[in-house]
Image (cartoon, grey):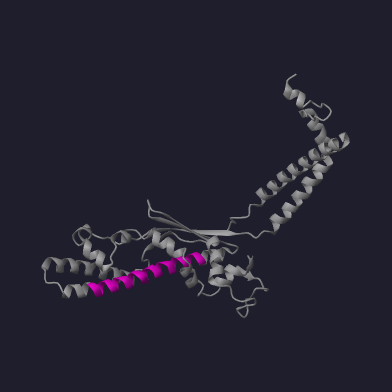
Amino acid sequence: MTQLDQAHPTNSSKEITVDLRELFSILWGGRKLIILITSVVSLCTVFIALSLQDHYRSNAILSLMTADKTTAIAGGVGGLVSIAGLNIASEMSKGAMIVNTINSREFLKHLLSFDDVLPSLMAAKSYDSETKKLVFDPDIYDATNKEWLEGEPSYLTAYRVYRTVVTVEFQDMRNIIYLDAEHISPVFAHDFLNLIIREADDSIRNRDVKRANEALVYLTSALSRTALTEIRNSITMLMRKELEQKMRGGIDSNFVMNVIDPPYIPIYKSKPIRTFICLLGAFFGLVIGIMSVVVRHFYSLYTSDN
């Protein structure tokens, strides 16, 4: 016998070894407790699953409508373009700008100026499928008088909810934007997406038209101070492009986004998946039941030995 064995002698009476047959015997003896715990946990899970609100997801697929800039402008008058504030690279793809606009707090603040957007985000309680209308929480919002009973939430508070409702993704390789909205009301999810698409397009339209006006003022001033024919021709070309941009902003219904697949009113819920929740609850109930029986068995052995 080694010194280690002498220092720690084996106490066979304190050792607990369990083979599969004994484990099965333990579980079979505690089957009533296992069934009881599994049933209680499963019933609680079913109750929780049934109490969860149905959510519906509407989505849209958009493509970018980028302005066509000639290589002559980019190559011949690059310095002048930079001074005038005309960024060729950003004009070629506005995907990041669209995503950042939709995800911005300022854009949400603008959306909240439309009727029922803020209550639909912050005070929605349930959805009436017969009338296809939202039911607002009467303790938070008085829908009849359009009054907040506990004070109107700030747009910063609403922004956290907004980011969980709206998802936007840009695939630069295909110039495609995927836009989703998830809500307990399928009608609001559809209408909210349409509002976002329209207002995001108008926001970028107004921004670009304003920039084009500022660029035209600068180019007109530069043209009056320049006598060289080559520079004057380049400035004239730039002015023509900015006039085209301004004209397109005034006549095109879609300025930067072309709707490939428009938003729709979903008829199938996106969550919760109640069957999965119930099965998961039953599984955890079974695990808890088995662990309870095993722990109780070994605890009784330990206390009996002591």
Question: As rendered, which of 8 and 99 lies closer to the eye?
Answer: 8
User: Where residue 60 sits in the image (x, y, percent)?
Assistant: 47, 59
Relative to 116, say whether 63 is above or below.
above
Tell me the residue at 64%/70% (across/down): 135
Tell me the residue at 29%/71% (across/down): 212
User: If the image is split into quadrants, where does the N terminus sit?
Assistant: top right
Relative to 45, say whether 100 is above or below.
below
Q: In this image, 211 relative to 111: left or right?
A: left
Q: Which residues are magenta?
A: 192-218
Tell me the residue at 20%/75% (across/down): 221
User: If the image is split into quadrants, where does the C terminus sit?
Assistant: top right
Question: As rendered, which of 10 and 83 lies closer to the eye?
Answer: 10
Residue 265 seen from this side: no
Image quarter of residue 188: bottom right
User: Where residue 28 sits in the image (x, y, percent)?
Assistant: 82, 35
Is residue 65 a member of the stretch shown in magenta?
A: no
User: Where residue 241 sits in the image (x, y, percent)?
Assistant: 24, 67
